Image: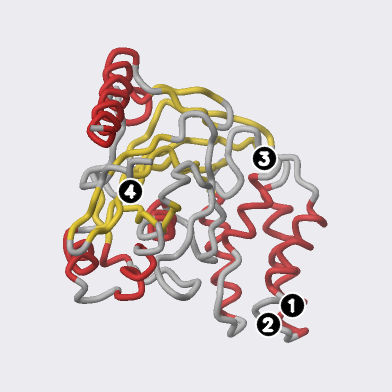
Amino acid sequence: MKKQTSVVLCSLILIGFYANAQKNGLKYILPDAVLTAKDICGEKICIPEGVGMPFHYTKKPYSPDITLGSAISAQDIALQVLGRTIPTDDIESQDYNTCSNTSQNPFTVSDLAHKGNITGREINYKKSETLSLSIDAAVDANMKELMKLTSDQNVLANMKISIKAAYTHINGQDLTVNGVYSEFSLNQTAMDKIKKGNEYQACRTELQKNQRIILGVGLVYFDIKFTQNSVDSISSQIDADLAKQGVKGSLSVSFKREITKTLKASSIGLYQILIITHAGLENDRFVYDLPKK
């Protein structure tokens, strides 16, 4: 009877939450504005397609650290969020773990599905501000990242020139920050492999450790542009210069992070997670409801 009462209470709370959301709409805190779900996805509630229990980051903005050096698009970012795990007893945790026994996410782009246009939906968020950057400090931060990739003094000297030239070119420019909303999820094939145990055995093992897997994500990517160019294209050129030097790796995230540190209109790292959907795993099926305490 006690367990049944808990189930009913949990269901009533969830129903009440969505009834209120449907009536008033959810609101999300972006770097320089508070927007409704209607502003972002065109609906009163934004939920990525697919399966899972939704969790909305409406109280506290969230931009987890991106480890993939070449993350330059919403899809790249989604790939580093989907398939991650969060503790069952701490769904609000801002510490995503890999669903594997290593630090590497076992999923790839071929495991993703997206809703609507893959380039995303422009939202009601357009801000302008002038970039005021400490160039030397920004260059130094990038050089620290570069020294993790190579110790070749010629490469370091050449790339320092390229990086400083790029920051000098953009510093003082009037930048426009546009918000673009995208939704991604693990596709059905990937989810079936997890459930049936055909692949991702290490992931199944992790989910048995009181963890839940992130199956869907809704995020805003901040596209920063200025006259005749964009931050994305400049960071891509930095990576192209790096490749010409024979170095495998990327500095695009590091390059853009130094720019966003000074901007009021963009989160550091150029993106913000608004919604995730998550589930637990029992035998060969996903379980959406949280365990009753």
Asked if residue 57 lies left or right of residue 145, the reply is left
Q: Earlier in the sequence, mark 3 or mark 2?
A: 2
Q: Which of the two residues, 51 or 7, is positioned nearer the viewer here?
A: 7
The amino acid on which the numbered mark 3 sits, given as a three-letter code, is: Gln
Judge left or right: residue 197 versus residue 80. Answer: left
Secondary structure of the residue carrying numbered label 1:
helix
Element at label 3 = loop
Q: CA distance from mark 4 to mark 2?
A: 39 Å
Q: CA distance from mark 4 to mark 1?
A: 43 Å
Mark positioned earlier in the residue sequence (4 or 3): 3
Q: Amino acid at mark 2?
A: Thr
- Neighbor class of circle 2 (other Cα within 10 Å; few <14, some 14-19, many 20+) is some
> Where, by quadrant of the figure, is residue 138 drawn?
bottom right
Residue at (29% x, 19% y) in the render: 16
Between residues 138 and 62, which one lies in front from this camera angle?
A: 62
* Disc 3 from disc 1: Cα separation: 27 Å
Most distant residue in the front direction: 1
Q: Earlier in the sequence, mark 4 or mark 1?
A: 1
Q: Tag 4: Cα neighbours inside 10 Å, few (<14), some, or many (≥20)?
A: many
The residue that disc 4 covers is 278
Q: Mark number for residue 156?
A: 1
The numbered dot on residue 150 is 2
Q: Nearer the viewer, mark 2 or mark 1?
A: 2
Q: Residue at x 53, y 41 (%)?
A: 62
Q: Position of residue 72 (x, y in %)?
A: 48, 57
